[in-house]
Amino acid sequence: MHLAFPLAASTAALLALAGCGDPQPLYVDGGYVRLNANPSGPSAAYFTIHGGDKPVVLRDITTDAAVRLEMHESKTQNGMASMEEIDTVDVPAGEKITFAPGGKHIMLWQINPQAVAAGKMTFTFIFSNGDRILADAVIENPDGSASAAGNTTAANAAADEHAGH
């Protein structure tokens, strides 16, 4: 019975200290680009944004490896699927925002063939707090295989992360 109080007190102290650590960072990971089977059609990119200690708004995404990109969101309403361009994305503190097939995604037109040959491309995510976060995305063929020889490990890692393994 005498051990219960010291144990509870030490547990409470550890929990209080855990709250005093470094603030949770805002970051982006898990990026991959799925090439379109039709080379003249747009491809799609997917990522996960991890919210930091304060809410922010994703205001823009850029890349030098494509002629044009747009943020889109797919929705199904009354049995009808649609896709619309979105300008911004709210990122609540401590939350994950997933860009994934069937939801939010990045549409890319005319990806640079050198990026495809390299097997990856870099994106810049621009947030309302002034953060500009660089994130790489593995480029995949339409069937999900790696687009460049020697990049199979990175493609598999991205696919495993995307599948939740």
Image: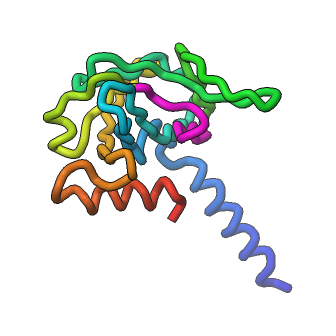
132 shown above or below 44: above
Q: Residue at x 32, y 30 (%)?
A: 123
126 displayed left or right of 63: right
18 shown above or below 64: below
4 shown above or below 91: below
41 displayed left or right of 73: left
* Picture quadrant where residue 153 is located: bottom left
Q: Residue furthest front?
A: 38
Q: Considering the image in quadrants, where does the N terminus appear?
A: bottom right
Q: Residue at x 42, y 33 (%)?
A: 44
In the rendering, at what x and y percent does residue 61 appear?
39, 22
In the rendering, at what x and y percent does residue 45 appear?
41, 35
Residue numbers of the magenta segment: 95-107
Q: Nearer the viewer, residue 16 or 83?
A: 83
How many callouts does the rendering have? 0
Tell me if residue 97 is in the magenta stretch: yes
Q: Residue furthest top?
A: 87
Q: Nearer the viewer, residue 48 or 80?
A: 80
In the rendering, at what x and y percent does residue 53 appear?
56, 35
17 displayed left or right of 29: right
Q: Nearer the viewer, residue 151 or 56?
A: 151
* Picture quadrant where residue 101 is located: top right
Tell me if residue 143 is in the magenta stretch: no
Q: Residue at x 42, y 47 (%)?
A: 30
Q: Nearer the viewer, residue 107 or 157?
A: 107
- What's the coloring here? rainbow
12 shown above or below 46: below
Q: Residue at x 55, y 47 (%)?
A: 20
In the rendering, at what x and y percent does residue 24 appear?
51, 42
